[in-house]
Amino acid sequence: MMVIDYQNWVTQLLKGFPSEYPWIPCTSVLCGILACKLVYTSSKLLSAMCFKHYQCLPRMKQVEWDNRIISTLHAMVITALAFYLAFWSDLYADDQHRGSFLFRSSALSTFVLGVSVGYFISDISMILWFYPALGGMEYLLHHLLSMAALVYAMLNREGQFYTLLALLSELTTPGINLRWYLDAVGMKRSKAYVANGVAVFFTWLVARIFLFIYVFYHIYTHFNQIKQLSEFGYYLTLISPCVLGALNLMWFVKITKGMMKTLAAKRD
């Protein structure tokens, strides 16, 4: 009875949005939020048991440690699913008989986007609660713009292909987080820290620079189809990659400078 009531409530809530399974968006977002809460709580317990450095860290460092566990797991799961949906499955295959790829979706693709919305809601909440310890305005801008694209694609079932491509940039997150962990446990001068810096440089180059170049090229070659989107979706598809690409380029410059500085110090 509770399940039926829930499905009816969700159907009424999202009756203005096209969806074969109207309960999926709300359910997936809730799953994302609950998963973040579960991982955060588990990290606090397991990290204290498994890592002796954890208990020696200041409180805010412990919070950031647990927060980065969430983002690492989210990145690993979401990038694998996004890659499968965007390139491995035939959901967005170039097939004129199935209509424009911009208006294709599935229960799985919608669920994946919803889980990411739940993650971004959780992460934004933590950033605002502990502001600016977990990130400044550039992180909030990145998260809010990403979440806007995710929510639009999830609810309207439009442009999910480009949203999944944007999620692939999360591939850089585990390396960035590992770099922070190595610093937190006092391994900043280790070979592992140097190797991590080089790995982050190349991963960022592929997943956030080359990937966005591909996105811009794809948008250019399919611009006639993009014009079929709603007005909000049209501008979101054009503006979001530009802003996110500019942020990625800004961070890439910082990563490059940091890597060069680390390599120079290692040679000395």
Image (cartoon, grey):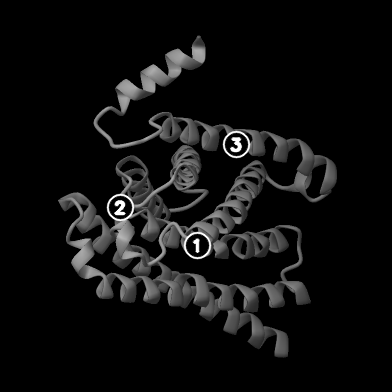
Residue found 44% across the figure and 72% down from its top:
211
Amino acid beneath label 3: Ala
Q: Nearer the viewer, mark 2 or mark 3?
A: 2
Q: Residue at x 39, y 75 (%)?
A: 214
Q: Secondary structure at mark 2?
A: helix
Q: Is residue 78 visible?
A: yes
- Mark-to-mark CA distance, 2 and 1: 20 Å
According to the picture, the residue beneath numbered tag 3 turns out to be 35
Decide which of tag 2 and tag 3 comes sooner along the chain: 3
What x and y, as percent, mark residue 247?
A: 38, 66
Q: Which residue is mark 1?
A: 168
Decide if residue 242 is on the left or right side of residue 48.
left
Whether tag 3 and tag 1 are in contact, CB under 8 A, the answer is no
Identify the residue at the far top of this view: 1
Q: Name the amino acid type tagged 2.
A: Phe
The amino acid type, in three-letter code, at marker 1 is Leu
* Label located before the other in sequence (2 or 1): 2
Q: Residues within 10 Å of mark 2 (few under 14, many from 20)?
A: some
Q: CA distance from mark 3 to mark 1?
A: 20 Å
Give the mark, 3 or 1, whose residue is nearer the N terminus: 3
Q: Secondary structure at mark 3?
A: helix
- Tell me the SS state at disc 1: helix
Looking at the image, is 160 positioned above or below residue 196? above
User: What's the mark number on residue 103?
Assistant: 2
Q: Nearer the viewer, residue 46 or 208?
A: 208
Residue at image location 66% in from the left, 39% down from the top: 39
Q: Residue 239 at what x, y percent from top left?
A: 25, 62
